[in-house]
Image (tube, grey):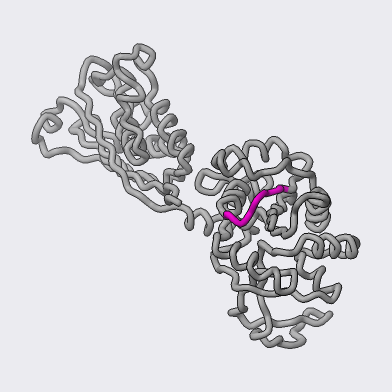
Amino acid sequence: MSIIALIVAAGRGERAGQPGPKQYARLAGQTVLARSIHALAISKRISAILCVIHADDRVLYDRAIQEVPQRLRKKLRTPVIGGTTRQQSVMAGLEALAGTDCETVLIHDAARPFLSKALIERVVDAVPATGAAIPALPMTDTIKELDAAGTIAKTPDRALLRAVQTPQAFTFKLILGAHRAMVDRETTDDASLIEALGGRVMPVEGERDNIKLTTPEDFAVAELKLTETVSAMGYDVHAFGVGDHVTLAGVKIPHTRGVLAHSDGDVILHALSDAILGAIGVGDIGQHFPPSDPQWKDAPSSTFVAHAIKLLKEKGGALVNCDVTLLAEEPRIGKHREAMIDSLATITGIKKERIGLKATTTEKLGAIGRGEGLVAQVLCTLRLPRER
């Protein structure tokens, strides 16, 4: 039996609070659409996948599918252009499949990237009974029905109510005929067309994790679901040398000496860079910016942090906060502290409220206590994608 998944991805998703269509927003480094495609493509029951996209989104689509493993991309058919409503988009997809070998079709919303293989199995296996199967969840809240005036009219029996999800599965001829017969009916649910024509729809157990991403809060919850929090520490030390200032957290601070370093010698930013690089397992600052390379002579250390954060983002991670401790007898940084925090916020892109900055001495002990140099320790918290 040829089973084809139809992914509806033509909407604008304006309530989601994303900079563009929500299906192309990124969750833990991967687009929502790519995650939905991946979830369907790994099912051996599904032979092909057809996406219905907006006319303006072909470039976004082409980029998104590059995030899907190549072996799974082979299941993708050339996308078709949807309409102004969800129903029109589904109809466009179904008409594109007419005349093909499709016997059963799964219609799925791109904004539900957490469907499981088990859920796909359940809906596919339930189709033969009535020709239509949908995932559904019992209601846990009491539901009220309003009257025309906006006051409570009645309380339906929640034992008879279900919250439905996608993918919804149908014999192809049945759902194509329903859409053609009900072309003027506005609906957000394909199964309702079967119901309106007197057909029977079989409910199967849905999944609480199979949420639809609709609001900014949904995206925040999804991001937490896909990531884990890790801690990392970075450490750097520089000896004093000839000069009239030191650079700390990107701020030039007047001093009677400078530091011996190939770059600008910013121990705080060097420690921060090493913390991030270490957390994602890509070496340390010396490997990425070797002191032997003349191009990094006197280079601003913000360049190193920017590189580390870029690699972090490419892995789907994000910097959450950082806590800096500077160990030095001199210079005193009290009057520069706010400027340093502002600079760190600009360099890292995190809020000032998530940046700690402290300075202490070593009570005259050791090389730092003798005023021979300065040390920085940085403790970071990062969010990284969970392994599949």
Q: Is residue 308 above or below residue 128?
A: above
Q: Work out whether residue 83 can be spotted.
A: no
Residue 47 falls inside the magenta stretch: yes
Q: Position of residue 30 (x, y in %)?
A: 54, 44
Residue range (magenta): 44-51
Farthest front residue in view: 1
* Quadrant assignment for the N terminus: bottom right
Q: Work out whether residue 325 can be spotted.
A: yes
Residue found at x 44% / y 34%: 311
Left or right: 184 as drawn, with respect to 147: right
Q: Position of residue 358 (x, y in %)?
A: 28, 42
Left or right: 298 as drawn, with respect to 104: left
Number of marks: 0
Q: Is residue 218 above or below residue 376?
A: below
**Nearer to us in this view, 228 or 320:** 228
Q: Is residue 207 above or below residue 363?
A: below
Q: Position of residue 51 (x, y in %)?
A: 71, 47
Residue found at x 61% / y 57%: 45
Q: Is residue 305 above or below residue 20?
A: above
Left or right: 86 as drawn, with respect to 291: right
Residue found at x 74% / y 43%: 79
**Nearer to us in this view, 178 or 240:** 178
Q: Position of residue 163 (x, y in %)?
A: 66, 73
Farthest top residue in view: 294
Farthest left residue in view: 365
